[in-house]
Image: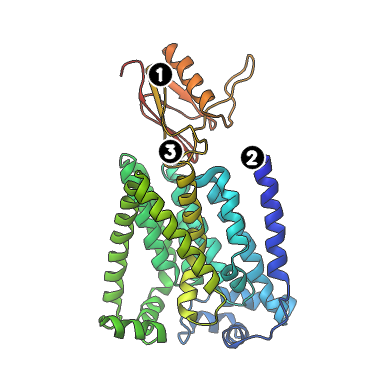
């Protein structure tokens, strides 16, 4: 744990150096110059403007920033650098929940990613929407164990993302589809589902003043060079609000189905290894091609989801290295007496550590500690297991502690 935190601090400093180096070397390019010009308008004019395809929050923040500090190349790009660093910290926090100690690998890949460094040095809203999207994802990761606090994270993350940039819409749909697949694999509890719906509804209602602007922008997207050529090549209908909603529905179904299939394929060695090779090859190719100055519209979509691509590739590599899906190589399926503990998707078996004469204390233990703790308590007839967050759940059900999950499947002949 301490080693991972020390490594992250090193990576964090290196990432800041990469993003601050030569920050003012190049003059503002067209989109940055437009952002500065637009931010020079009055706040009311910025809010009411309909000629731009982006929401007004970034321009309002830049307006206040320039009014206080000035408008040189370095100064107008500094907020993007700051938000990129916040995004890196949130990505590491999300990685800790989903990947455990492998989060340091994901943080390293993201800190050094050319695409992320590029947009961190640009005076545009892309670096602002990424931390908000990660906040939304953090809320999703907390739904099963803390559903109602997670609702607040989802609502705030979604609302902020929508006010920064509309690229969050397909990302929100995709993340929701993946979470629904995970929710289905974990017994379909009602409370987390209601919390997810409530958080999403609250986020969209907070964005209600700009619903007309979003509908206007969706109609314009059909004329953007990339989307126009894509529609013509695939013979797709013109992009309207109805077509956009249908596409988002298909995306939700596709991501949920894809996540479900992915988990099933990862259980078999040949498909798992094939998927890992393809994912690493695609990720490497995308990383190398990112600096090529082409396909700007596509890159704006890709960079918003890049932290999640990094987390996915890191998770796949961890699954390949440890097929049981846990942090510990031996934690795939452990038997001792009549007790079998199987680590679930969230990587790792976490149990209390005890100290002499004291109550269980939250902490991390390996498989021997896990099995020994289970045997001792089950032999004593204790129907509750206690986890690091001191939450009691039935021993015969699913024990969830924050980002950890352990299922006891067979206990005392049950």
Q: Is residue 43 above or below residue 120?
A: below
Q: Residues within 10 Å of mark 1 (few under 14, many from 20)?
A: few
Quarter containing the C terminus: top left
**What residue appears at the point 63 percent right and 14 percent down from the top-left corner?**
357
Expressed as whole percent of the image width and height from the top left, the position of residue 402 reads 50, 39
State the CA–CA distance, disc 1 to disc 2: 30 Å
- Does 30 sit above or below residue 188? below
Give whichever of 43, 188 is nearer the camera.
188
Q: Residue furthest front?
A: 270
Give the residue pinned by disc 3. 324
**Left or right of 315 in this view: 111:** right
Whichever of labels 3 and 2 marks the residue nearer the N terminus, that label is 2
What's the CA distance linking mark 3 and mark 1? 26 Å
Q: Which residue is mark 1?
A: 383
Secondary element at image label 1: loop
Position of residue 311 measured from the top left corner of the image (x, y, whole percent): 50, 55
Residue 293 lies, in percent from the top left, at 55, 82
Between disc 3 and disc 2, the foreground one is: 3
Quarter placement of the N terminus: top right
Q: Secondary structure at mark 3?
A: loop
Residue neighbourhood size for the residue with mark 2, other residues' Cα within 10 Å, grouped as few (<14), some (14–19), many (≥20): few
Q: Nearer the viewer, mark 3 or mark 1?
A: 3
The residue indicated by pointer 2 is: 1
The answer to the question of whether label 1 and label 2 lie on touching residues, with beta carbons closer than 8 A, is no
Is residue 87 in sight in this rendering? no
Distance from disc 3 to disc 2, alpha carbons, whole Å, reads 21 Å
Q: Residue at x 39, y 20 (%)?
A: 339
């Amino acid at each position: 744990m301490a080693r991972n935190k020390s490594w992250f601090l090193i990576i964090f400093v290196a990432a800041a150096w990469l993003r601050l180096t030569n920050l003012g070397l190049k003059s503002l390019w067209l989109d940055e110059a437009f952002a500065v010009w637009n931010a020079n308008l009055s706040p009311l004019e910025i809010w009411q403007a309909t000629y731009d395809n982006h929401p007004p929050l970034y321009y309002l923040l830049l307006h206040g920033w320039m009014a206080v500090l000035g408008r040189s190349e370095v100064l107008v790009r500094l907020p993007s650098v700051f938000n990129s660093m916040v995004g890196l910290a949130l990505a590491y926090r999300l990685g800790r929940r989903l990947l455990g100690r492998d989060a340091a690998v994901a943080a390293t890949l993201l800190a050094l990613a050319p695409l992320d460094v590029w947009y961190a040095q640009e005076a545009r809203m892309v670096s602002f929407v990424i931390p908000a999207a990660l906040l939304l994802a953090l809320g999703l990761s907390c739904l099963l164990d803390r559903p109602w606090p997670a609702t607040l994270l989802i609502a705030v993350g979604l609302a902020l993302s929508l006010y920064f940039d509309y690229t969050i819409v397909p990302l929100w749909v995709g993340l929701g589809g993946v979470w629904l697949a995970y929710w289905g694999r974990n017994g379909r509890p009602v409370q987390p589902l209601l919390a997810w719906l409530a958080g999403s509804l609250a986020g969209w209602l907070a964005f209600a003043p700009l619903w007309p602007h979003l509908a206007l922008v969706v109609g314009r997207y059909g004329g953007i060079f990339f989307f126009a050529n894509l529609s013509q090549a695939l013979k797709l209908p013109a992009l309207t609000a109805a077509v956009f909603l249908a596409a988002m529905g298909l995306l939700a179904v596709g991501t949920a189905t894809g996540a479900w299939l992915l988990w099933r394929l990862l259980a078999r060695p040949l498909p798992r290894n094939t998927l890992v090779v393809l994912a690493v090859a695609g990720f490497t190719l995308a990383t190398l091609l990112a600096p090529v100055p082409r396909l700007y519209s596509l890159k704006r979509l890709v960079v918003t989801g890049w932290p999640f691509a990094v987390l996915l590739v890191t998770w796949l590599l961890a699954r390949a290295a440890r097929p049981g899906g846990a942090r510990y190589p031996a934690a795939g399926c452990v038997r001792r007496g009549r007790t079998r503990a199987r680590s679930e998707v969230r990587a790792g078996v976490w149990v209390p550590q005890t100290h002499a004469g004291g109550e269980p204390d939250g902490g991390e233990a390996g498989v021997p500690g896990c099995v020994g703790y289970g045997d001792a308590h089950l032999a004593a007839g204790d129907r509750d297991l206690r986890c690091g967050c001191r939450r009691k759940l039935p021993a015969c059900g699913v024990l969830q502690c924050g980002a950890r999950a352990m299922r006891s499947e067979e206990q005392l002949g049950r």
